[in-house]
Image (cartoon, coloured by chain):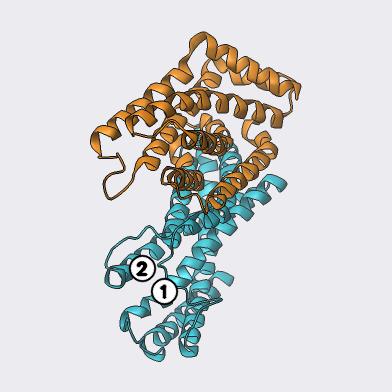
Amino acid sequence: MKPVVAIIHKDVAIEFRNKESISSMLWFGLLVLVIFSFSFDSSGAGDVDIRAGLLWVAFSFAGILGLNRSLSMESDNDCLQGLLLAPVDRGDLYLGKVAGNLVFSLVAELIILPVFAVLQHVHFDWKLLAIAGITVAGTLGFVSIGTTLSMISAHTRMKEVILPVLQIPMTLPVILCAVTATDMVLKNETAGISFPLSVLGLFSIVYLTASYFIFEYVVEE
Amino acid sequence: MKIRMLAILSLVLIPISLYFAFIYAPTENTMGHLQRIFYFHVPHAILSYVSALLLGLGSLMYLIKGDLKWDRLAYCSAELGILFTVTTLLSGIIWSHPAWGTWWEFDARPTLELMLGLLFVGYHMLRAYLPERESRARLSTVFGFLAALDVPINYFATYIWEQHHPRVIGPGGDLDPDMGIALLVSMITSGIIYAYLLAQRIEIAKVEEEVEYFEQVVQA
C-alpha cells in the first residue's frame, strides 16, 4: 500500500505546484456545458431531456483531456523511466496512477456539477447528491481503463490522437450506464436504477483487476 | 493444401446456400422477400463476435506464451472483424429502412455491433502508430485483451434500452423449420468462408512480416 500512497502524494504535489491538470479539465468541461446550454433548449421543458447526456459529454471530454495531461506529465523529461526504476510492483504503480487521475477528475467534476445545476435548473437537493454519487462511480470506471490506455498510447507517435480513439469505444458501457442513471435521477424515476449502477460497478471491478495484472506488459521496455 | 480445400469447399457451398436462402426457404408472411436478408445478416453478426473472441484468445495467449503466432491470429481476426461488422451493419441498415422506417435505431444489438466495429478499428489504428514489431505486438495485445473483455459488459449495458430488434432464435423464438435449415446452411457456408479468409490472411501476414524484417535488415 505504501508505494501507492507515495505515487498519489507525488502526483498531488506536482498538481499543487503547476495546477495544469485540474484547471485544464475544469475550463474545458465548463466550456462544453456553456456551449451546449447555448445550442440546445436543455431546460427539460422540451420534448427531449438532454441534461444527463450533456453532463456526461462534458465529463468524458474533460476526462480525456485530464488523462492526456497525466500522460504528458510522465512522458516529458522521461519521468516514467524514473518511476519504473523504483522498486515498485507494476500493479501498485497502476493503482497509484488511477488514484491520482481519479482525484483530479473528481475535483474538476465536483466544481462543474454545481455550475451544471445552475445552468440547467436543477435544484440543490438530494438529486444533486445522487448525481455526485453516480459521478464518482462513473469516473472510477472511466479512469480505471483510461490510465492503462493512456500508458499504451504513450508509446505511439500520435499520443493525443490515439487516446480518444481507444478510450471512447471502450468506455461506452460507462457512459451509457452513467447517462441512464443520471437521467433516472433527474426525472425522479429511480425504480430500475440498480441495473445501470451494477453494470458500472462490474465494469470498474473487471478493469481494475485486469489492468492490475496486465499493467506490467504495458510499461515493460 | 488445407487452404485450397477450404477455398473449393466455399465455392461449392456458396451456390447451395444461395439456393437455400432464395428458393428453398419459404417467404415470410409480413415482410415478404425482405426477410431473406436474415440468412446473411445473422451468420455475419455471429462471425463478428467470433472475431472478438479470437482477438481476445490470441491476445491472452500471446501475453502468456510470448509467441508471435498468437499475435498474428489476434490481428488477422480483428481485421476480419472489421469486415464482418461492416457487412452486418450494412445488411441491418438495408433491412431496417423498410422494416422499421429508419436507417438506424439506437437499439441494443446495433449499438453493440457498432461498438465492436469501433474497437476493431481502434485496435488497428493503435498498431499502425506503433512502428516496432515487438512493442506493437505487446501493446496491441493488451488492448485486444481489454477490448474483448468489454464485449460481454457492453452486452449487459445495452440491455437498458427497450428492444425493437427481432428475436427469432433461442427462447421465445418461433422460427419455421425450413427457415431454420436455410439458416443452418448459410451459417455453415459463412463459417467455412471465414475459416478460409482467416487462414489465407495469416499466410499473408507471415509473408508481410518477412518482408518487414528484410526491410529492416537492409536499412540497418
**Chain letter for the cyan part:** B
Closer to us: B217 or A80 = A80
For the N terminus of chain A, give its image quadrant: top right
Q: To which chain does the residue with label 1 belong?
A: B
Disc 1: which residue: B40
Instruction: Give the residue displayed 48% in from the left and 39% down from the top.
Output: A167
Q: Drawn colour of chain A? A: orange
Q: Is residue A169 above or below residue B198?
A: above
User: Callout 1: helix, strand or loop?
Assistant: helix
Would residue B64 be seen by someone viewing this image from the given angle? yes
Instruction: Give the residue displayed 32% in from the left and 60% down from the top.
Output: B104
Q: Amino acid at mark 2?
A: Ser
Q: Position of residue B60 (x, y in %)?
A: 66, 49
User: Horizontally, is A83 left or right of B176 in the view?
Assistant: right
In terms of sequence position, does the residue under pointer 1 or pointer 2 come before the other?
1
Q: Are marks 1 and 2 in contact (CB under 8 Å)?
A: yes
Q: Position of residue A197 (x, y in %)?
A: 56, 46
> How many angstroms separate mark 1 from mark 2 (CA)?
8 Å
Closer to us: B65 or A166 = A166
How packed is label 2: few (under 14 Cα within 10 Å), some, or many (20 or more)?
A: some
User: Callout 2: helix, strand or loop?
Assistant: helix
Q: Is residue B173 above or below residue B44?
A: below
Q: Is residue A213 above or below residue B89?
A: above
Would residue B220 be seen by someone viewing this image from the given angle? no
Disc 2: which residue: B91
